Amino acid sequence: MNFRKTVIDEIFKCYSVNALKVDGDTQLIFAGEGPGSCQIFSGDQFLEKKVLWSNEDGFGGTMSIVTLSDQEDSFLVSKGFHSMVDSETSGIYLYQKDRDGYKETRLLSIPYLHRFDVVRAGDRRFIIAASLHGGKTDKEDWSKPGKLYYAVLPSDLADIGQGELELEILKETMYKNHGFNKGIWKGRESVFVASEEGVIAVTPPLENGGQWVIEEILDFPVSDIAVIDLDEDGEPELAVLSPFHGNQFNVYKKVDGNYVSVYTYPKDLDFYHAIYADTFKGVPSFVIGARKEDMDLYLVQVDKKRGQIISHLIDTGVGAANARIIHTSQGDMIMAANRQINQAAIYQAL
C-alpha cells in the first residue's frame, strides 16, 4: 500500500489531532504542545486556516482534542500541559462555534492532565480524564502518581453554566499514567488506560447510581494502548507500546484465555508514541508512530490471504506524536501530528 502525503502546515511541536464536522464538511484540528498554536483547516484542500490561538498567546499545552459525534461545531481540548513539570494549571475547555468565531468555556481544572475523552453510556455521557502524575520537582521525579477522573457532560451543551463541572476521582495511584484511548470493550464504549501498573478497561454505568467497571487487562508496564478486533474473529486485539516512551510495539491476542504477543514490528525504533485504532478503507487497523531512530509511521492490518499480520509504511523520518484515522467525503485519511519536524500532515492511500 502506498500513500500520498499532503503537508497542511508547519506547527511548532505539533502534537494533537482530530477532525470536526461543520455543516457536514470535515475540518482538521491540529495543536502543539508547549506554547504551540491550535489551528483549524477547512475547504476542499484544507487551505482555509483559522488560528484558534497562536504560539504567542501562551494558551498551548494541548495533549488531547475531542470531538462530539452528535454536536457539530463544538469540540473539547485540554490546555496547560506546557511541560512534564509545568502543567499544574491544566484543564479541559469547550469550544462552540458562534458568529464571532468560537466561544470558550473552561469545564474542568485537572492538574497535570494528559489525556481525556467523552464516553457514552445509555443516554448519558461522561468526560473521563487521566493525569500523568501528581506533581514533579524535575523531569525525572515520578514519586507522585497520577489519577483517573470523571465528570458528567450534559447532553445539551446549553445546560453548561459558568461554573466548572463536578469532578470525581475514579482511581488513584497510577504511576506514569500515560496511555489512553477510547474503544469498544465487551460491547460497550470504554476507555483503555495504561500505566506502570498495566492496562485497565474503564466502563461507565448505564444507569444513574450504577457502578463503574474497572477491569485489569494487562499487568506489566505499558506506555500506550489501542484496541480493535484486528482479525475480525469477534475477540479484540491489543496494540501495545512499552515500556514508558519505549522501544517496543506488539500486537497481543487472547489465546487460551491469556493475551500473548502475536506480532512485533520488524525494525528497531524508539520513543514509540502515536497509536490509534479504527477501520481504514473498511479494514480494521492500528496506526503506529515512533519519535526516535528512523521515526516511522505505519499501518498495521491483517492480510487475510496470507493469514498474518502485516505493516504498511506510511512515512518515515517524521516522529509523529499522535495520529488518527478519519472518514471523509474524499475517502479515509490518516492525520498525523509529526512533532519532531513541526509538521501537520494528512495521508491518503493511492
Image (cartoon, rainbow, N blue to C red):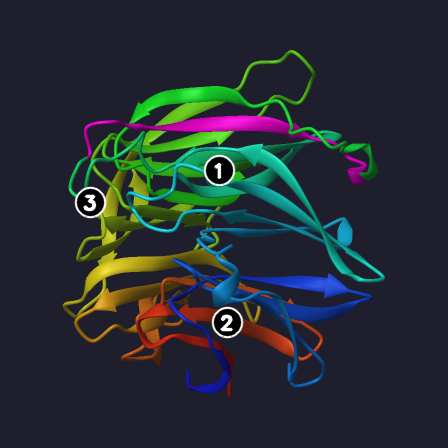
Q: How far apart are labels 1 and 3 at the CA level?
A: 27 Å
Residue 27 percent coordinates (x, y): 67, 70
* Residue farthest along the top direction in this orientation: 209
The residue indicated by pointer 2 is: 334
Q: Above or below — where is 258 with respect to 305?
A: above
The residue indicated by pointer 3 is: 139
| Residue 151 in sight | yes
Q: Nearer the viewer, residue 228 or 39?
A: 39
Q: How far apart are labels 1 and 2 at the CA level?
A: 21 Å
Q: Earlier in the sequence, mark 1 or mark 2?
A: 1
Asked if residue 154 lies in the magenta stretch, the reply is yes
Circle number at residue 191: 1
Start-end of magenta stretch? 142-157
Q: Nearer the viewer, residue 133 or 99?
A: 99
Q: Nearer the viewer, residue 306 or 152?
A: 152
Q: Amino acid at mark 3?
A: Lys
| Residue 235 in sight | no
SS for dot 3: loop
Q: Quadrant of the N terminus?
A: bottom left
* Residue farthest along the front direction in this orientation: 56
